[in-house]
Image (cartoon, rainbow, N blue to C red):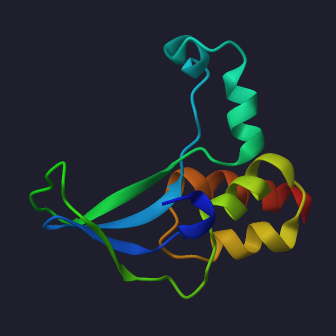
Amino acid sequence: MLERDVFIGDTYQIGEAIIQVTQSRIPCSTISKRLGIPGILPRIVATGYTGYLCRVLEEGIVRKDSQIKLLERHPDSVSILFSNEVYFHRRKDIEAMEKIVAVPELAEDWSEPLTGRLAKLK
């Protein structure tokens, strides 16, 4: 499931568990060392394909062959890829940041910095 196709607030079933997408993943600065690829961090950030994080809404057994099923597409349609574009490259785009922080399911780890940026820009 690519970042362009996954939206903040989307709900999925994996095995017996129910999860909800809450934010994009921000790669740590040690990723180059871990992967053994010098300079990979800026290349990952440039693509916007950083991964994403979810909250568990309902615990359940997940097996390696468990299917991933979209249960509900969030109506605000704020993709992970769009979020990354705004967060990393459109740092002064007030309208785009407002669209992202308006999604109630957005994790605080993202809503707080974006809200702070908005306050400074207004």
Instruction: Give the farthest residue toward the bottom.
Output: 75
| The image quarter in which residue 50 lies | top right
Residue 19 position (above or below residue 42): below
Please say if 33 is above or below 79: above
Vertical side of 104 occupied by 50: above or below: above
Q: How many marks?
A: 0
- Residue at point 33% right, 71% down? 12
81 with respect to 119 (left or right): left
Which percent across, then down, holds residue 84?
Answer: 70, 53
**Is the C terminus in the top left, top right, bottom left or bottom right quadrant?**
bottom right
Q: Quadrant of residue 75?
A: bottom right
Camera-side residue of 36 and 88: 36
Counting from the top left corner in percent of width and height, residue 112 is at: 61, 55
Identity of the residue drawn at 48% across and 60% down: 1
Q: Quadrant of residue 121?
A: bottom right
Q: What residue is drawn where x is 63% and y is 47%?
A: 49
